[in-house]
Amino acid sequence: MKIGIIGGGLTGLVAAHALSERYEVEIFEKMPFPGGCLSSYSINDYWIERYYHHCFSTDTHLFALIDKLGLSEKLEWKTGTTGYYANKKIYALNTPKEILLYPELSIVDKAKLAYLTLTAKKADLNALDNIPAERYIIEHLGENVYTSFFEPLLKSKFGEQRKEVSAAWLMSRIAIRSNRGVAGEHLGYLNGGFHLLIDALLLSIERNGGKIKKQQPISSISQKNGSWTINDCRYDAVISTIPPQELERVGGPTMQPIPYQGAACMTLAMEREVAQGIYWLNMKDAAPYGAVVTHTNFISKERYGEHIVYLASYFSGSVPAQLDRRMLDDFCNRFSIVPTEIHWHKMAIDPLAGPVYTTGYRSLIPAYEQKGLYLAGMFSQPNYPERSMEGSIRAGQDVAACINERRGHD
């Protein structure tokens, strides 16, 4: 049997990895590199992800895959610190003392926030699916907790669509990030970068005879006599990992559209560090980016020979005009950086980087098998209500299992 897979991101590669042991598999990837949002730059003598990444202690499917691919010895655990940039100052928010000293929240606000964090894992996410996160926080914790703490978080992840995000996403986010010590959050990373995971998947697929067709966007898809055609190539089954509305645009079936957003992520390198040791700095003050993510405050600078910083921004529709210049200028001005201090910078833009978990999102999630096609990706059930590497891996493995089960019955 011949299987065509649309999209060479993590879900597509995981599905191909699982299926290539039994079937002939071909992947269509529009970019010149595989991996999607988990792809990496090769800089000098090191690799760095185009978009910041880390994993969590609960990512059991990711760990199992890493083990199967022989990468377990590369998995390491570090402390990820967080903070807020508010009123032109940096505030670390990790230790009890730092949280108590944060001037943007009162003692009562902090007590409410601590209680919410402790109870997040018990929240009924189904009941929260139709409730906006903004309304939920304001009603339960007050407007100041929302504007001083949660709005910057929502802004850093969803940009201008933050008011549409459901409380289910927010509570899930709080729960998944509750694995904290007294100095910060326990987060995982592959020593050498997550490109090792992508390369290992590709190697396994190719060893099994699978192929990846890079720089081949989908121009057409159609079904006839029980088989599918992608760009004039015939397949017995097709897995699509792209948004359902994008598949419909090239001839796929009509389905409910999934709300998506674009991501613009600037990666830059410089000699000195400007975030006061903080890994993830949310921007409460207005800026053309929602967060400053200093990778080398998480992973040692010695591995790269320079500090690596991400400026993260999300958008709807088209990319804002001159966003790269605005981001770089603001970063330099805000943190007193002379432009010549920046060794290099690169901008990664994906107009369909991931779903926006708006209210009612649960009802939009498509089944893995849909109108003769197989669908899996960031829009799938395992990625709700928080998208992650873990969710994408589970979606790829689930859809591969669906095909194996169906072919077994046939």
Image (cartoon, helix red, strand yellow):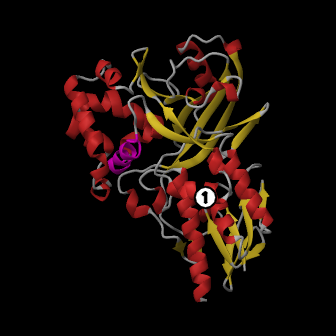
Q: Tell me if mark 1 has few (under 14), some (14-19) or many (20+) residues whose alpha carbon lies within 10 angstroms of its own.
A: some
Q: Position of residue 278 (x, y in %)?
A: 49, 24
Q: Secondary structure at mark 1?
A: helix
Front-most of 90 and 304?
304
Front-most of 215 and 195?
195
Q: What residue appears at the point 55 percent right and 31 percent down from the top-left corner? A: 298
Residue 406 lies within the magenta run? no
Q: Where is 263 relative to 70, above or below?
A: above
Front-most of 15 and 369?
15
Q: Is residue 388 visible?
A: yes
The residue wearing badge 1 is 65
Q: Position of residue 318 (x, y in %)?
A: 58, 41
The quadrant in which the N terminus is found is bottom right
Q: Where is 207 relative to 130, above or below?
A: below
Q: Main secondary structure of the magenta part?
A: helix
The quadrant in which the C terminus is found is bottom right
User: Where are the magenta residues, as a range?
Assistant: 166-179
In the image, farthest residue toward the front = 73
Q: Is residue 29 visible?
A: no
Q: What residue appears at the point 58 percent right and 78 percent down from the top-left corner? A: 372
The answer to whether 83 appears left or right of 21 in the picture is: left
In the image, farthest residue toward the bottom = 410
- Which kind of residue does numbered mark 1 sit on? Leu
